[in-house]
Image (tube, rainbow, N blue to C red):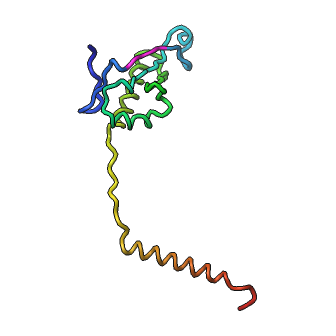
Amino acid sequence: MAEPIPVTPFLDLDPDDIAYNFVRSSGPGGQNVNKVATACELRFNLAGSALPPDIKARLVPLAGSKLTKDGVIVIQADRFRSQDMNREDALARLVEMVAKAAVRPKRRIATKPTRASKERRLEGKQKRSGVKKMRQGKPGMD
C-alpha cells in the first residue's frame, strides 16, 4: 500500500484515489517533444475518495471546469520537460486545491447598524428629497 499524501496536519489523500496518465506535451522540448510522453494528466476520484463531506462540498466549486460529471478532478500539467516534474506539479496543484477547501469559512456574525449610521442614512434621504422637491416648480414661476 502506498503512503498517504499529507495535505494538512489532520488530512491526508489516499494515493489509490489518484491516477496518472502521460501524454505528449506541446511546447518546448525540441525533437524530444515528438517522442516522449511528458505531459501529466492527474485524475483524482473526488466522488469515491475518503475526504469528509464538507471538504468535498467546498472542493466542487474550487475545481470548477476541472471536475467531470463523474466526480473526477482532472489536472493537466505540461509546464516542464520531464515527466517527474510534471507529475509533482500536478500533485502539488491538487494538494493546494484540497488544502484551500479544508479551510472552513468564517461564519458571518450579524450586526445591527449603529445609531449614527442610521441618522446619516436618514439625513441623506432628506437632502435627496429636498433636491427633488426643488424640481417640481413650473418654469418661470419664481
Residue for point 53% across, 14% down: 24
Based on the displayed image, in which of its 4 quarters is residue 34 positioned? top right
Based on the displayed image, in which of its 4 quarters is residue 45 positioned? top left
Task: Find the residue positioned furthest to the right.
Answer: 140
Task: Find the residue positioned furthest to the left.
Answer: 10
Q: How many marks?
A: 0
Residue for point 48% across, 23% down: 76
Drawn side of residue 47 relative to residue 7, left or right = right
Overall secondary structure of the magenta stretch?
strand
Q: Position of residue 26 (x, y in %)?
A: 56, 19
| In the image, residue 20 lies in the stretch drawn in magenta | yes
Above or below, comparing residue 37 to residue 78 in the picture:
above
**Range of the magenta residues?**
18-22
Q: Position of residue 2 (x, y in %)?
A: 28, 15
Q: Nearer the viewer, residue 80 or 3?
A: 3
| In the image, residue 90 lies in the stretch drawn in magenta | no
Task: Find the residue positioned furthest to the bottom.
Answer: 142
Q: Nearer the viewer, residue 27 or 56?
A: 56
Q: Position of residue 58 (x, y in %)?
A: 38, 38
Residue for point 40% across, 23% down: 44
Q: Quadrant of the N terminus?
A: top left
Q: Quadrant of the C terminus?
A: bottom right
Above or below, comparing residue 131 to residue 82 in the picture:
below
